[in-house]
Amino acid sequence: MPVSDTKVASMRDAVTEFVRDGDTVAIEGFTHLISFAAGHEIIRQGRRDLTLARMTPDLIYDQMVAAGVARKLVFSWLGNPGVGGLGGIRRRIEAAPSAVDGADGLLPRLEVEEYSHFGMVARYTAGAANLPFMPLRSYFEPDLPAANPRIREIESPYGDGKVYAVPPLKPDVTIVHAQRADRDGNTQVWGLLGCQKEAAFAADRVIVVVEELVDETVVRADPNRTIIPGLIVDAVVVEPFGAHPSYVQGAYDRDNRFYLEWEPITKDEDALQAWLREWVFELDGRAAYLEKLGPERLAALRPSGPAPSGAVDYGAYR
């Protein structure tokens, strides 16, 4: 079923329409607003040969890599924040070719392309601005240029020495989670930001996943919160708790229990594949996932009370 004229779609329809085998896919959000729901739907639909790009691949990319959707990872920092490592990804990086047992049997070794945090931001920024590269004063001490030939030392055209350059990153699809959007895709975010805006502008196709669909008048009343304009959005998916176990400022907290419980799961490939079967493949969508989590666990993540920001009067003109 194609996405409607208003851009509002189910997660299943949005992934079917806009995520294709072989794509470069960026699911961005810096600890905050990570669209696990989209990642799970990509797994369920059996996408293959994806290049997964993300500043900080955490649990969602561990799950996606273990499920066999990816052939390459483009990233900066890698790990389970505050807890440990990501065994699913590590086994795919370290293994001999076609030596990792996954959902479809043997999986090939995972290609990796590593940058610093700022290197990834610079790549997205170059992609968004349609620039051939982005210079940065970094990488003079780390070993990353030796490990990644795409980080290149160049002479400044203004005579002030050498800098490093990174190429643009232009995902085929960028997926971001946000607090709200209207039917045209005008997307508003508050709280901790990563490089969602840059990743969206750099992409060919954009899927926005939101906690709430609001009227255009709500967006117009507070335009400075709109980080992604509807003109670059292809689909809007309404998926409450779609970022769990990460958090959404004002809606629910980070599920730290989940991150702690992931550590023993990710260390054991059989346990990881069993988790994927139980929590992704055997469920038909996010509603089933939330029902399985249970209302008590979800309620415990809700804010204890409101904490509104100060009101801003934009004024009215006669």
Image (cartoon, rainbow, N blue to C red):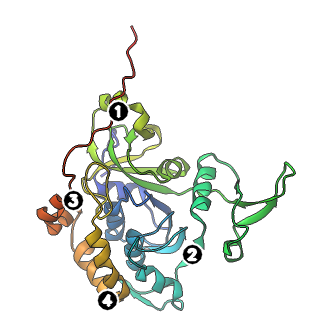
SS for dot 1 = helix
Q: Badges 2 and 4: C-beta atoms under 8 Å apart?
A: no
Is residue 151 placed above or below 6 in the rendered structure? below
Specify which label sits upstream in the sequence, 3 or 1: 1
What's the CA distance linking mark 4 and mark 3?
29 Å
Q: Which residue is mark 2?
A: 112
Amino acid marked by disc 1 = Val
Residue 311 seen: yes
| Residue 223 spot, x, y in % from top left | 41, 31
Q: Which comes before the other along the chain, label 4 or label 3?
A: 4
Q: Tag 3: residue type?
A: Leu
Q: Secondary structure at mark 3?
A: loop
Query: Horizontal and vertical percent for residue 296?
Result: 12, 63
Q: Nearer the viewer, mark 3 or mark 1?
A: 3
Helix, strand or loop at mark 2: strand
Q: Which residue is mark 1?
A: 219
Cα separation, mark 2 vs mark 4, equals 23 Å
Q: Is residue 53 above or below residue 107?
A: above
Name the disc covering residue 37, or none: none
Judge left or right: residue 101 versus residue 155: left
Q: Label 3: which residue?
A: 301
Q: Residues within 10 Å of mark 3 (few under 14, many from 20)?
A: some
Label 4 secondary element: helix
